[in-house]
Image: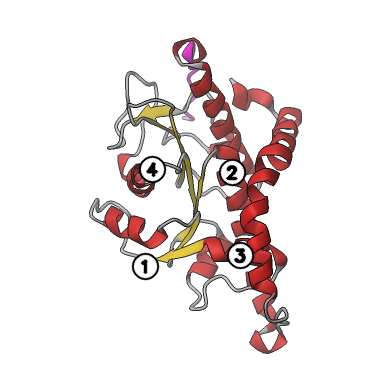
Amino acid sequence: MATQLKPVAGVKDQVSPEEWAIRVDLAASYRLVAMYGWDDIIFTHLSARVPGPEHHFLINPYNLMFEEITASSLVKIDVHGNPVGETLYMVNPAGFTIHSAIHMARDDAHAVMHVHTKAGQAVSAQAAGLMPLTQTAMLIREEVAYHEYEGVATDLEERERLVADIGSKDAMILRNHGTLTVGKTVADCFIKLYFLERACEAQVMALTAGPGGLYNPPQGTPEKAAGQGKYGLGMVAEKLAWPALLRKLDRLDPSFRD
């Protein structure tokens, strides 16, 4: 028998306007991940920090598909992944291991997104990592760090190594695992994820021609593009791309705002 979704009532009235705005953006990012086909049934997580000194975060209910998630159904958790207050939904504390490490280590990590796409996993398993084959890759490649696979991320001691590996960068390829991005806002984080995933997809397609069939950009061009991406993606995310994506979601299904 299929499980019916339970309505979550009154959440908007119980939280600050700042938290509600973040809930709407994070719910939108879950819907967009589903729309682009980057979801993995109910697995992987997108998280965002709640404003305030309590070190609380928002994350997905573990038993909902990404296209079902709404602003009200997001679960507020503490640094250990345990729910804060009452909730109708279950959460996966182990799934917050990776996120909590970065959120707690960096003041600028207001949003963290981690996915297991086919293209992202494929590039994570390639010795060269992300290659400067396309404009998309060159714009974000210098922001990409790497972390060795240590098994399913349930070991809390791995958090120290995750933090050390990502340093001050805003994207990471988790070797033999998937991709991850960090952002000052949900919008910033999602657009970085979009660029990283598109770059991985293009690389997988390009490599079907074999290394001998690849055309590499002129010397110095990847570095130039990296500088352009470092200073341009944030503005594009906040002012242009994110509002456009929200309008698209509103046309398709505005229930993420509920």
User: Which is more N-terminal, label 3 or label 2?
Assistant: 2
Instruction: Name which residue type carries label 2.
Output: Asp
Does 63 sit left or right of 80 as displayed? Answer: right
Marks counted in the figure total 4
Does 150 sit left or right of 208 as displayed? Answer: left
x and y percentages locating residue 130 in the rendered image: 56, 70
Q: CA distance from mark 2 to mark 1?
A: 25 Å
- Label 4 crowd bin: few (<14), some (14–19), many (20+), radius 10 Å: many
Between tags 3 and 4, which lies in front?
Answer: 4
At numbered mark 4, what does the secondary structure look like: helix, strand or loop? helix
State the predominant SS element of the stretch in magenta. loop
Residue beneath disc 3? 200
Circles 2, 1 touching at the beta carbon (< 8 Å) = no
Instruction: Name which residue type carries label 1.
Output: Glu
Image quarter (top left, top right, bottom left or bottom right) of the C terminus: top right
Residue beneath disc 4? 103
Front-most of residues 200 and 48: 48
The magenta segment: 2-11
Residue beneath disc 1? 148
User: Which is more N-terminal, label 1 or label 4?
Assistant: 4
- Label 2 crowd bin: few (<14), some (14–19), many (20+), radius 10 Å: many
Q: CA distance from mark 3 to mark 1?
A: 18 Å
x and y percentages locating residue 167 in the rendered image: 40, 58
Between tags 4 and 1, which lies in front?
Answer: 4
Instruction: Name which residue type carries label 3.
Output: Cys
Residue beneath disc 2? 188
